[in-house]
Image (cartoon, grey):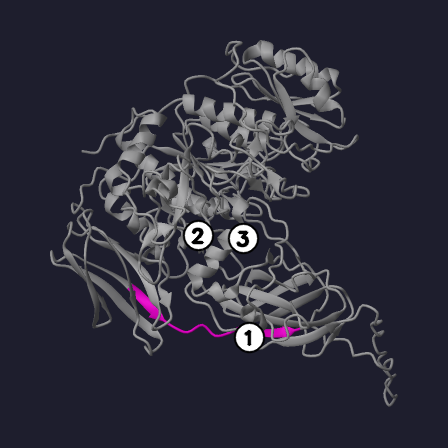
């Protein structure tokens, strides 16, 4: 019997105190005592010392930790004021104050003051959102009705992930009604028809202006990233028969925006998100990100321990108030149980090369006590096996549970091709599956505490074996924790009890003759399930003890382009069908630069045409090192790998792709527009000869390479002045000898900011399918997940 869930109200009022521009002492909230909150983080073997080089006159944000309550906040306020700083926010419940200063001596001065436990900067780059100046204004944005038409074909058959964890089987019994899930991310697009009506505006907030909460709608909708929108759809997209469906479509969502337009989630943003969740009725909060600028925050680093402690306190407080926090484990394929080196931090300025780290250095929030840490799973096309995604972090006693995170279709903000649904990879995509299952558990267990919900997630999880041949996996829990979460169990649906069977694939568009993974659910335990493609029987497989099957099939080689039904039929008579489309993706074409063109600038914009909405990868080679471009690179035993240009934690696009002369090649990825057009700008090109190539994927297969285009860069050549238009009968003026004519109009060759996503160093020979290319994208943007996508998005 379905249990009606009672609303959970915050047990105590929390006052967000906002300081004015005149450095007035802020008002404080409810008195919460004077004892220091929780257990302080301890230090192990020393990590390499680091220091934030703060310059006088440069505006920086800080966190100041004291005892909880009015007395502690008063001590922090006095210390900040005496040091010439400004109090931005206070949280008396956890003894945390956010402050600003332009003095290089600020941290040391405040740290030495009476009553201060720790103080430190929240970033290594100067504040870009400006000085704190009071409560921001408001802006209204139209929200469409939930009945708005959804363009394009339904994509629910693409959701292998929802079938694999039993979500479809669960929905006949439980959908998460009455549960509020916080999407602590880059904002939710409320104009997406699958999310319209799913977001509780009154519970939503923006935290990206110095961590000051702003309830204006403009503060919590997305501006530069669709990461949070994708996460939101996985959790609670409406079950309306079109588009996608979430794990808990009956739940409501709160958009808690903590990702800045630059793609960063600084401690003050995250703290605001945790504290808001604690006091606004949020039952489950998803955190698909890591806190910037340090991938690992170290307890023995003077510039990191205060930020780490402040976030820890916020997590602890939200948990105490009844919020179950779920977080992405990260996308670096890193053993969190054996930390040695961090090569990516800080990510808002210049990373410290090979920074030694230790067990006291934490990836936050996923490694904070009380947070459910989620690893990512992939569906292997060749076998149908479900195992660790190549990018997912792992580690003994570091992972709590796992969920699908590769090839995940969900809601997105409308892209250049007009799509509002798309596929992403990352632990950022795995974590919201767990948040959705937790919402189902919260609905069926309305009195459960966060710790009890976590225990249910683990006890109901489906065990998975270590991948064959992967020696890093000594125990399955090293990769998967307790296993893959189980939505049908969370809803109380027994194996085989679902009224209908379900089927899912990663993409319904496939190349004939190529194996692809398929999963089913809702069959009777251990019954025989036969798969047919069109009218041909592909194979018969026994369902497991849960009535599920994961296997691989293919469309026959040589099959003509068109639609083919893929049907799974059990001996019990249950069936499930998805329509597959056979097609072969053609190579893109390049329009500029033209063959043998001389580019007179140190940058070039490569343009061309591909399939509308396809992900296009443009590769640029030094033709001396790679005379046949990708052919030469693949033939090398150990081809040089170009360093990736800097990226932030969420799914942010960089304008240009810097060339890597040492490696001799780079590539950039972008999305083709509605007419198939694309452009990628490369900068920092030395004089010399180059080759440009492109290939594309639509999410199901990768095309062949385009024809290569050879051109040269010679910055010493002076571009000719435009030829004057002669009067009738006049002879055109000649161009300077030895100078190639300027390119034709509409053929740009200099940088104009393409909005392409830079990525370097991946071997495209590994891109054997759309899912593989997307997995490479997840690897390249590990920081994102955790943001955890996507917020850094653990996209």
Give the side of residue 201 with respect to residue 647, left or right.
Answer: left
Q: Position of residue 307 (x, y in %)?
A: 59, 28
- Count of residue discs: 3
Picture layout, residue 724 above or below residue 57: below
The local secondary structure at tag 1 comes to loop
Q: Which mark is residue 706?
A: 1
- Residue marked by disc 2: 390
Q: Measuring from the top left, give residue 88's x and y in whole percent.
A: 65, 24
Which comes before the other along the chain, label 2 or label 1? 2
Distance in Å between CA atoms under marks 1 and 3: 23 Å
User: Is residue 109 shown to the viewer in this render?
Assistant: yes
Q: Is residue 580 magenta?
A: yes
Give the extent of the magenta segment. Answer: 579-592
Task: Tell me the residue that label 3 is attached to.
Answer: 780
* Between discs 1 and 3, the one toward the N terminus: 1
| Left or right position of 64 against 420 | right
Q: Is residue 247 left or right of residue 325?
A: left
């Amino acid at each position: 019997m379905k249990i009606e869930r009672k609303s959970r109200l915050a047990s105590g009022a929390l006052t967000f105190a906002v300081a004015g521009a005149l450095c007035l002492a802020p008002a404080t909230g409810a008195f919460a005592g004077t004892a220091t909150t929780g257990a302080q983080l301890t230090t192990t073997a020393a990590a390499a010392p680091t220091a934030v080089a703060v310059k006088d006159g440069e505006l920086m944000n800080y966190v100041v930790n004291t005892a909880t309550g009015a007395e502690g906040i008063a001590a922090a306020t006095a210390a900040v004021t005496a040091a010439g700083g400004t109090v931005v926010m206070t949280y008396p419940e956890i003894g945390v104050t956010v402050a600003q200063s332009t003095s290089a001596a600020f941290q040391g001065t405040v740290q030495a003051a009476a009553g201060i436990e720790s103080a430190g900067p929240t970033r290594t780059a100067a504040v870009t959102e400006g000085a704190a100046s009071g409560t921001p204004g408001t802006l209204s944005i139209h929200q469409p009705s939930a009945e708005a038409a959804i363009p394009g074909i339904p994509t629910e058959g693409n959701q292998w992930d929802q079938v694999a964890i039993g979500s479809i089987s669960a929905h006949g019994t439980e959908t998460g009604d009455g549960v509020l899930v916080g999407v602590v991310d880059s904002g939710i697009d409320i104009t997406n028809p699958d999310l319209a009506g799913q977001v509780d505006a009154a519970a939503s907030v923006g935290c990206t202006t110095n961590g000051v909460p702003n309830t204006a709608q403009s503060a919590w909708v997305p501006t530069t990233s669709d990461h949070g929108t994708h996460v939101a759809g996985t959790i609670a997209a409406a079950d309306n028969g079109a588009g996608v469906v979430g794990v808990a479509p009956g739940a409501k969502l709160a958009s808690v925006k903590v990702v800045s337009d630059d793609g960063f989630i600084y401690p003050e943003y995250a703290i605001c998100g945790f504290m808001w969740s604690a006091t606004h009725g949020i039952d489950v909060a998803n955190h698909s990100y890591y806190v910037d600028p340090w991938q690992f925050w170290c307890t023995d680093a003077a510039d990191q321990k205060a930020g780490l402690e402040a976030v820890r306190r916020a997590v602890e407080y939200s948990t105490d108030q009844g919020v179950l926090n779920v977080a992405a484990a990260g996308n670096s394929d890193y053993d969190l149980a054996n930390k040695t080196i961090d090569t990516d931090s800080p990510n808002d300025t210049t990373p410290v090369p090979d920074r030694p780290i230790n067990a006291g250095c934490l990836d936050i929030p996923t490694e904070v006590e009380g947070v459910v840490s989620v690893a990512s799973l992939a569906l292997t096309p060749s076998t149908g096996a479900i195992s660790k995604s190549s990018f997912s972090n792992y580690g003994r006693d570091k992972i709590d549970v796992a969920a699908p995170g590769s090839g995940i279709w969900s809601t997105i903000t409308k892209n250049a091709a007009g799509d509002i649904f798309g596929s992403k990879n990352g632990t950022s995509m795995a974590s919201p599956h767990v948040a959705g299952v937790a919402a189902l558990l919260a609905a069926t267990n309305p009195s459960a505490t966060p710790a009890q919900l976590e225990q249910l997630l683990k006890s109901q999880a489906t065990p998975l074996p270590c991948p064959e041949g992967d020696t890093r996996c000594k125990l399955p829990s090293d990769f998967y924790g307790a296993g893959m979460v189980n939505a049908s169990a969370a809803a109380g649906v027994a194996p085989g009890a679902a009224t209908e069977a379900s089927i899912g694939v990663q993409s319904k568009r496939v190349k004939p003759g190529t194996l692809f993974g398929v999963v089913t659910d809702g069959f009777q335990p251990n019954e025989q399930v036969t798969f047919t493609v069109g009218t041909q029987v592909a194979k018969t497989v026994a369902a497991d003890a849960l009535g599920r099957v994961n296997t691989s099939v293919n469309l026959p080689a040589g099959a003509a382009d068109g639609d083919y039904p893929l049907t799974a039929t059990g001996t019990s008579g249950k069936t499930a069908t998805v329509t597959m489309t056979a097609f072969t993706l053609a190579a893109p074409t390049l329009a500029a630069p033209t063959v043998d063109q001389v580019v007179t600038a140190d940058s070039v914009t490569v343009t061309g045409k591909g399939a509308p909405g396809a992900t296009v990868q443009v590769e640029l080679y030094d033709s001396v090192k790679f005379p046949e471009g990708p052919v030469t690179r693949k033939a090398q035993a150990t081809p040089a790998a170009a360093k990736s240009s800097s990226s932030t934690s969420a799914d942010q696009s960089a304008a240009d792709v810097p060339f890597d002369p040492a490696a001799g090649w780079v590539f950039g990825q972008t999305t083709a527009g509605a007419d198939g057009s694309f452009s990628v700008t490369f900068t920092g090109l030395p004089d010399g000869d180059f080759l440009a190539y492109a290939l594309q994927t639509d999410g199901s297969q990768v095309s062949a390479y385009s024809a290569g285009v050879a051109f040269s860069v010679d910055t010493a050549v002076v571009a000719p002045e435009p030829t004057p238009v002669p009067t009738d009968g006049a002879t055109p003026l000649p161009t300077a000898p030895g100078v190639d004519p300027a390119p034709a109009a509409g053929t740009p060759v200099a940088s104009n900011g393409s909005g392409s996503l830079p990525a370097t160093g991946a071997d495209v020979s590994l891109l054997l399918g759309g899912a593989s290319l997307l997995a490479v994208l997840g690897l390249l943007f590990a920081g994102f997940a955790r943001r955890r996508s996507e917020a850094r998005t653990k996209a």
